[in-house]
Image (spheres, rainbow, N blue to C red):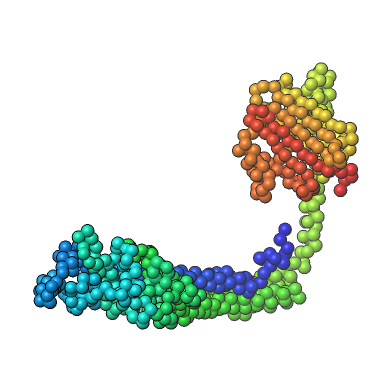
Amino acid sequence: MIPSKYRFNNIKLRNKLLILYILLVFIPIVVTNVVFYNITMNNIKKQKMNDVQLVLDQITSEFLTTIEQAVGISTRFYTDNHMYDFFDEEYTTTISYVEAYDFYLRYLNRFSPIYYSIQSLTFYTDNPSVIYAGGVRPISEATLNTTWYQEISDSRYPVFMRPNPTEEYEMFSVIRKLDYYINKSKHSKIIKIDINPLTIRQIFNNVTFQGKVYLLNEDGIIEYSNDEHFDWKTSAIDFDTIEMPSDTILLEEAFLPGNYLDGWKIVGAIEESDILEELYNSRMIIMILASINFLFPSLVIIFISRSLHVRLLRVLKHMKKMKNQNFETIKYADDKDEIGELTREFNRMSRTIKKLINEVYIANIEKKDLELKEKQAQLSALQSQINPHFLFNALETIRMRSVMKGEKETAKIIQNMAKIFRNSLTWNKEWVTVREEMKLVICFLEIQKYRFGDKLEYTINVTEDAYDCIIPNLAFLPFVENASIHGIEAVKEKGIINLQVDLIDGYLVYTLQDNGAGMSKEVLDTLVAELKSDNSMGDSVGIKNVYYRLKLYYKEDFDFTIVSNPNQGTTVTIKLQCKNSYY
């Protein structure tokens, strides 16, 4: 039972309105604004991340396009048979070389105007008869010691790299050995295509990307970046060693395609504060809107609360005055709402009571008192007209007549019915002995045996020391009733009810077993669930009534089990602590 101080009807109206304000205004607005802010932040973050990813994809695409252009040019020369002839030729005179150069390499410098990303093309050869000028250079001792020459020595594919990684130089090159016709080549040939540094700078310094972009080689070393906080041009810096702000989000592209970019990848790094900068700028607008949402409902609630509270206090004040015989009416009772009607009715009641007291009540009080006593006397007379002993005497007369006529079985049944009816007058008795309960059970079973005839048999075994135990009244009878009516009556075969009551280690063990219709697992589970729930009684009123009473009296100190199988019967076991005194 809820304590009176916590009942809602005991809360003052002002506090009720405050509760309504908190539950219906304050909490919904806070939750709505928080949810709206989080959803907006997540949507903006998601949209910004998509935009950033698209920009990073664009950077990657433009970078790959630039590299593919250089690789495509190298492939053009790689399969050009005339180029191999040009560099393998032994030139005896300068004029013959110049003529050959003009014939084979006259279009050498036309790639730069066509492809803005290509800065220059350079050929390296160990043919001593060529003139090292116009984009042709020797494979000298210094060339052999360069990093890029060592890289392409063991590679069949183009190599993409910075030829001078230790110098403050942003030049990238695609370098390739011309060994397609290696079987007939007399001299080594290498093509080196330098990519325009301005093109690379424009790609990686995309103004629409708010973060930093890093080009990493297969070892995770930074080859290029728009991050100027560290010197990646002259030092080999591992990307994993860079310390970044805690809110940094990394956008890692898949590994770049192509044998010449095996293991390379582009990584974007952007701070979450940069992504949500627009949302942070809009935070003030959100706070202003939230304040408006708070202020307007609060003012309305305050106005309505004051309108109700003040007028109700005025009515209450005048009602308290009535205890002292002060029937003063309330002024300004012209309001049209419910409180206004209550005020007018109070004024009318006050005037009426005052009139009754002065004119009617005092004069007629004695008359009303006599009428009340007369009504009480009539009620007592009506109650005394019904005498239960008349029913007992009538049943006893019928039983004696049956005995005189030799109808002993009918007489016995009438006697059992009289016992049950007589016992009903004491059903308001809380506790009985097992002996008294068994007498009632036997009377009920005898009546049922008279009803079913040879179809019903029963056995009752009670240990002698269990008879004097005190149990709640009608703790066992409802189960006997269920066994006979719902169990035995539903089958065609002979029904047997076995009832055993034992006293074991201070506990009274009641076992009722029948071979009746039984219950399916689903029905049994439903019955057990209903017993353990606090809902309405449902169908099994008698069983639930007993279960609740036992739980009330014994708390958790009792055991109650039901086992049932379809067409095999039901077994009910109740284990109670034996008590030897009423309470």
Along the horizontal axis of the image, is 288 left or right of 417? left
Compared to residue 119, the image places residue 252 above or below, namely: above
Residue 47 point in image, percent of width and height? 39, 69
- In the rendering, at what x and y percent does residue 365 appear? 78, 64
Q: Residue most toward the top?
A: 406
Q: Is residue 460 above or below residue 124?
A: above
Tell me where residue 575 sits by quadrant.
top right
> Does the image show residue 222?
yes
Residue 25 image offset from top left, x and y in percent: 54, 72
List the single residue furthest toward the front: 92
In this picture, residue 419 sits left or right of residue 483:
right
Q: What residue is at 36 percent from the left and 63 percent from the top?
A: 262
- Residue toward you, 283 or 68: 68
Q: Nearer the viewer, residue 25 or 67?
A: 67
The answer to whether residue 485 of the structure is visible from this angle is: no
Quadrant placement of the N terminus: bottom right
Tell me the residue at 61%/73% (across/down). Answer: 18
Q: Residue at x 16, y 63 (%)?
A: 81
In the foreground, 325 or 337: 337
